[in-house]
C-alpha cells in the first residue's frame, strides 16, 4: 500500500468516526410542576484525543490492508491509464454511494474485529451495518486520491488553516461554496473574481465547517478563513482536534 493513500483513507475514516462519536451533553432543567426534563447542551462530549487516534489507526490499518491493490494505489494517474478503475471505484457524484456489489466485495475480506469494534463503541448499531458505514468513507477516499491538481495549487498551505496540524493530508475548501455561486452573483454578495477562493483544511476541519453552517450562510457570513477562525465553536474545535495525533509508523 502507498503511505499517502493510507493517510488519506485514515483521515476519511477518522472524519466519519468523529462525526458519529460526538454526542450532545445532556443537562436538566425544571419543567412545569417541578417536572425535570432533559435538554441538549450545544457543547458535545468528545473522546480523549490520544485514545481516538489509536482507535482510528487500528481500524484504518485493519481495513485498508484488505483492499485490492488497485484501490490501495488509486490515483489521478491510474484512472487516466485505466478508466475502468474510475467506473468501479468512483461514484458519479459525492452523494451517490458505490454500487452494492462493489461494497460487498470490498467489505467481505475485512476482519470481523473491525465491525465488532465499531459496534461496541456505538459507531454503528450492528455489525451488519459496516457496508453502509464504509460506503461514504470509500467514496470520499476514492474521490480524494483521484482529484486532479487544482488551479489553486499555488495557494496551498503547509498546515491546516484551522487546527494547524501539518502532518496530515489537506483538502481545499471553497470559501464560497460552488453550489451557491449563481445566487452569490445574482444577489451581489461578492465579486465574481472571489468565487474560487479556497482555504486548505484537514478533512476533520473541512467537515466541521460544513456542519457549522449552510452553504448560503458560509457564502454570506463565513467567506474568509479569518472570519471562520474567529468563531468560538471553531476555536474550541481546533483546540480539541489539534490534539488528535497519529503515532509514527
Image (cartoon, grey):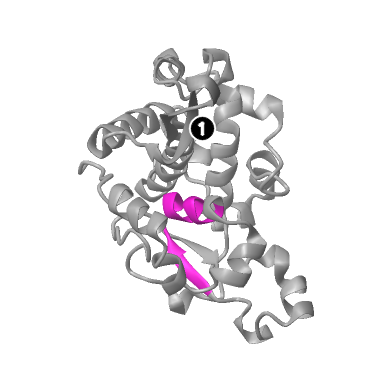
Could you tell me which residue is drawn at 31 percent across and 29 percent down? 55
Q: Is residue 15 visible?
A: yes
Q: Quadrant of the C terminus?
A: top left
Could you tell me which residue is drawn at 57 percent across and 59 percent down? 147
User: What residue span does the magenta drawing correspond to?
Assistant: 198-210
Location of residue 221 by image quarter: bottom right
* Secondary structure character of the magenta stretch overall: helix
Badge 1: few (under 14), some or many (20 or more) residues near its Cα, within 10 Å? few
Q: Is residue 176 visible?
A: no
Location of residue 11 by image quarter: top left
Could you tell whether 143 is left or right of 120 in the image? Answer: right
Determine whether the residue tagged by mark 1 lies in a helix, strand or loop: loop
Residue 226, position in %: x, y? 42, 73
Q: Which residue is mark 1?
A: 68
Could you tell me which residue is drawn at 68 percent across and 50 percent down? 83
Q: Quadrant of the N terminus?
A: top left
Amino acid at each position: 500500500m502507498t503511505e499517502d493513500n493510507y493517510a488519506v483513507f485514515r483521515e476519511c475514516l477518522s472524519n466519519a468516526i468523529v462525526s458519529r462519536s460526538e454526542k450532545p451533553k445532556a443537562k436538566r432543567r425544571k419543567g412545569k410542576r417541578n417536572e425535570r426534563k432533559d435538554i441538549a447542551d450545544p457543547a458535545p462530549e468528545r473522546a480523549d484525543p490520544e485514545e481516538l487516534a489509536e482507535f482510528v489507526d487500528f481500524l484504518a490499518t485493519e481495513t485498508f490492508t484488505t483492499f485490492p491493490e488497485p484501490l490501495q494505489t488509486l490515483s489521478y494517474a491510474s484512472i487516466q491509464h485505466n478508466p475502468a478503475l474510475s467506473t468501479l471505484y468512483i461514484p458519479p457524484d459525492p452523494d451517490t454511494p458505490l454500487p452494492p456489489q462493489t461494497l460487498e466485495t470490498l467489505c467481505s475480506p475485512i476482519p470481523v474485529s473491525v465491525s465488532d469494534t465499531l459496534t461496541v463503541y456505538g459507531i454503528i448499531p450492528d455489525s451488519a451495518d459496516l457496508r453502509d458505514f464504509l460506503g461514504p468513507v470509500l467514496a470520499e477516499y476514492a474521490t480524494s486520491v483521484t482529484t486532479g491538481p487544482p488551479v489553486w495549487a499555488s495557494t496551498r498551505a503547509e498546515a491546516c488553516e484551522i487546527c494547524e496540524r501539518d502532518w496530515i493530508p489537506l483538502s481545499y475548501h471553497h470559501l464560497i461554496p460552488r453550489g451557491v455561486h449563481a445566487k452569490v452573483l445574482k444577489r451581489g454578495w461578492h465579486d465574481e473574481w472571489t468565487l474560487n477562493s479556497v482555504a486548505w483544511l484537514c478533512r476533520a476541519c473541512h467537515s466541521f465547517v460544513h456542519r457549522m453552517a449552510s452553504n448560503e450562510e458560509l457564502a454570506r457570513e463565513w467567506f474568509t478563513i479569518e472570519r471562520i477562525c474567529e468563531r468560538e465553536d471553531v476555536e474550541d474545535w481546533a483546540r480539541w482536534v489539534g490534539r488528535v495525533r497519529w503515532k509514527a509508523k
